[in-house]
Image (cartoon, rainbow, N blue to C red):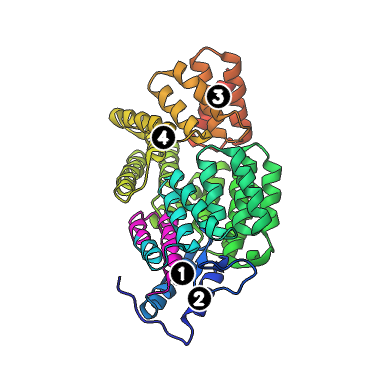
Amino acid sequence: MALPRPAGRSAVAAVALALAITGGAVVAGGEDGPDRSPSSSVAVAPGALRGGDLDRGVAVLQSHLRDQPRDFGAWATLGTAYVEQARTQGDPSRYREAERALDRSLELRPRNDAGLAGRAALAAARHDFAGALRHARAALDVNPYNEGALASRIDALVELGRYGAAARAADEADARRPGVPVFTRYAYVRELRGDVAGARRALSRSFGFGSGSGGGDVAYVAAALGQLAWRQGQYGEALKQCGKALRADASYLPALECRARAWAGQGDTGRAIRGLREVVARAPLPGPLVALGELYEARGERGDAAKAREQYALVSAWLSLARANGVNADLDTAIALTDHGDRAERKAALRAAKAEWGRRHTVHTADALAWALHVDGRSDEALPYARRATATGFREASFMYHRGEIERATGHAAAARHWLSAARDLNPGFAPKAKTRAKTRATS
């Protein structure tokens, strides 16, 4: 890997500064603990590097490693940063670069917690959540205070559907390394169990905590608050929080996407389309691509149908690229292609949903399988999964809408009205086309 030489007298200090300015928590590498002086190795918690600062941090790390190619901690940090670039910028090819960097770190020092935590982050990003949990636990065996490993352990348990264990892991992480990465995950665990107020309190607690006043962390936390508000149909609050995020980092993509979705919820379709076009131009990920396609369909102006098809074609291209770079894209496939694929793609979506359910039992996989079965004309089979998707109390309008449609298809008229009304009342802008159907059927 060709790496340019660094400028300045202390490359390690430059690396630490490059990471710290993003709001990332710099933690000790090797076997340093929370009360020991950090070694020259540094690591960053997954998700802590963001926006333009992420790219600058990567450049500084590359420069440092040209000068110090045996710095196992810097290789680990670079690998973790590549993971974040792939995840946030829609470029799965970065995962292979991350894998090489992390392998180099662990080749130089096999039992280094930064490298093991990086492997956990990489496995989670590739949707290998059993692997992520294994690597996170290995990192914590070396250093129980590694922030990235604590965060990845929570992520893996959540994505495996082990919500009780995830809540316990979040409590343990909060006791060991309270900070933005832990607080945001703690908030999501609370939200999954229906405690929206608790999730909001946990996110609000992040502001001003330790490094949480940095621009990167302000953007991260405010965007998370905006997304939480959007899921509750609170579009004004979502715009307020996204505005705060974008004042801290004008390029922060999750805030730009959340803002566009809030505009759509308020009925400002043109503005929402322009906002999502900006997002997908920089990060062509399935979620915003599908949202943009659905907005084109809902607007229905001349040429919009073709534009919508273009977005769905890009989703299929991204899925192929992701698989080629080691990503398990089954859940993304099921979610995107069930509603927007042709007949063969819908069959592929159902197979993908079944495969994903075989690996992990989460509310998201339950909902995806339920909807894929329903679209395939197998609503009786779908109903138990739809009910399971809504069983934890997670307030997600699309899950409620799917359950309502499946209840209606199986002859449960009262339950159908209840769940379609719940979807409409919670977040009427959750999907432009589904919104109209939910409103009509909830009153029929």
Q: Secondary structure at mark 3?
A: helix
What x and y, as percent, mark residue 220?
57, 58
What separation in Å lies between label 1 and label 3 (alpha carbons)?
46 Å
Question: Residue furthest toward the bottom?
Answer: 9
Q: Residues within 10 Å of mark 4 (few under 14, many from 20)?
A: many
Numbered tag placed on residue 171 in the rendering: none
| Mark sitting earlier along the chain (3/4) | 4
Which residue carries the number 3 mark?
A: 387
Main secondary structure along the magenta-highlighted residues: helix
Which residue carries the number 1 mark?
A: 73
Viewer-side residue, 423 vs 173? 173
Numbered tag placed on residue 356 in the rendering: 4
Q: Amino acid at mark 1?
A: Gly
- Name the front one of labels 4 and 1: 1
Q: Secondary structure at mark 4?
A: helix
Which residue range is magenta in the image?
A: 70-99
Are the residues tagged 1 and 3 within 8 Å (C-beta)?
Answer: no
Are the residues tagged 2 and 1 within 8 Å (C-beta)?
Answer: yes
Numbered tag placed on residue 40 in the rendering: 2
Look at 63% across and 43% down and name the residue there. Answer: 167
Q: Is residue 87 magenta?
A: yes
| Mark sitting earlier along the chain (2/3) | 2
- Name the front one of labels 3 and 4: 4
Q: In the image, is residue 322 above or below residue 28?
A: above
| Mark sitting earlier along the chain (2/4) | 2
What separation in Å lies between label 3 and label 4 (alpha carbons)?
18 Å
Left or right: where 51 falls relative to 345:
right
- Name the front one of labels 1 and 3: 1
